[in-house]
Image (tube, helix red, strand yellow):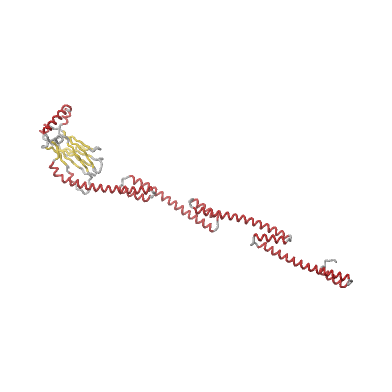
Amino acid sequence: MRFYKIINPQLRILIRLQILLLILSLLSIDLANAQGKYTVFGRVIVEDGNLEGTSISLFKDAERAETQEVDRNGKFEYKLEFGHEYVLSFSKNGFVTKKVSISTYVPDEILQRDSQFPPFKFKVSLFPAYEGIDLSVFDQPMGMITYDPELDDFDYDKEYDSQIRDAIRKASEEANRRAEEEKARRLAMEQSYKTAIQKGDVAYRSKKYQVSLDAYQQALGIKPKEPYPQTQITKVEQLLAEQIRLENEQQALDEKYTVLITQADGSMNTQDYATAKSIYQEASGIKPGEAYPKTQIEKIEGILAEQARLAAEQQALDEKYTGLIAQADDSMNAQNYASAKSTYQEASGLKPVEAYPKAQIEKIEEILAEQARLAAEQQALDEKYTGLIAQADDSMNAQDYASAKSTYQEASGLKPAEAY
């Protein structure tokens, strides 16, 4: 049953003859060289991993014959000489090493009759070497391939297989259980990683840098070898450093602004408007968006404008007052008391608190009162004098000379300067 396990002997012989005639006619030299070789081939599978770093070591009669890396497709093929004990060892770092024993011992009479056997194909699956699992069963071959006289072909040694099958099954089941646990752990870790990355990315886009930094650090703790969270951490740390620098600058700016506003308000309260305006302008330059210093500057400009208007009015008032005082003084000096008094009164109306025009008015009123008194006395004197002269003239006309003389003497006493 060599050719793919065909059981019918007649059909097997017929096929053998056909193959033999074909080989002899086309590859007689290769046939001679191929005799004494037995082909095994198959494929290596790495569970929960890739084939990178997977190797196959061929041992011939307990001596290492060769070691080779497994191709990317995982396939392998070996042509083994008859009459030897071979072991194929399949290994990868971090995974359980598996071995397959192949005995190419075949009776000479069989080989002389026919040394062409169908290739033997098998698959080897490597799984991670989880801690805590008894893997000692894999120190021995997981299978033995030997020549079976009943089949007249190579097959697994059933007795060996029955001895080791249960131990391999238990180890495989435990490995599968651990693989499922590991898979679940990896899935949970992957989900935690994705959640942390998503949280970090959302916070990063929202410029919540401390939240994003914590999330990226959490992701990096889950997958320390992933470059993305480390790259993002570097970016966020730079942004946070810049943010702190800007916050420090802003704090210094705020403090300076507050000091300037306090100084300006103090100058404003003491009505030092020029100084206050200058400081408010400096504060507004620091924070152009703040309305308060601009409002205060506008208020100061209004006050200064009003002060300028009042100053101009005061200057005009002062000039008019000064002119009236000068005019009144001139009239006073010219003894034009009525005009002087009127002008002094007008000046006093402009500046009611000024004492000078009031004092001058009082002085004029005293002069005018004295003039009125003297005028009244003079009028009385004149009237008495006139009366005495008339009386004396009457006495003179009446030739009462003594009486006339006496009366003329009295009148002359009133006005000694009068010649009459």
Question: Picture coordinates of residue 249 (x, y %)?
Answer: 44, 51
Q: Nearer the viewer, residue 340 or 140?
A: 340
Question: Picture coordinates of residue 316 (x, y %)?
Answer: 64, 55
**Above or below, 331 relative to 122:** below
Question: Picture coordinates of residue 32 (x, y %)?
Answer: 15, 29
Relative horizontal placement of residue 282, taking residue 180 as reference (left or right): right
Q: Quadrant of the N terminus?
A: top left
Taking the view exactly as shown, the residue that stands out farthest to the right is 399
Relative horizontal placement of residue 401, taking residue 54 as reference (left or right): right
Number of disc labels: 0
Residue at horizontal 48 percent and vertical 53 percent from the top: 257
Q: Nearer the viewer, residue 75 or 194?
A: 194
Rendered image quadrant of residue 328: bottom right
Residue at horizontal 14 percent and vertical 29 percent from the top: 18
Q: Quadrant of the C terminus?
A: bottom right
Question: Picture coordinates of residue 108 (x, y %)?
Answer: 11, 33
Residue at horizontal 70 percent and vertical 58 percent from the top: 327
Q: Nearer the viewer, residue 404 or 164?
A: 404
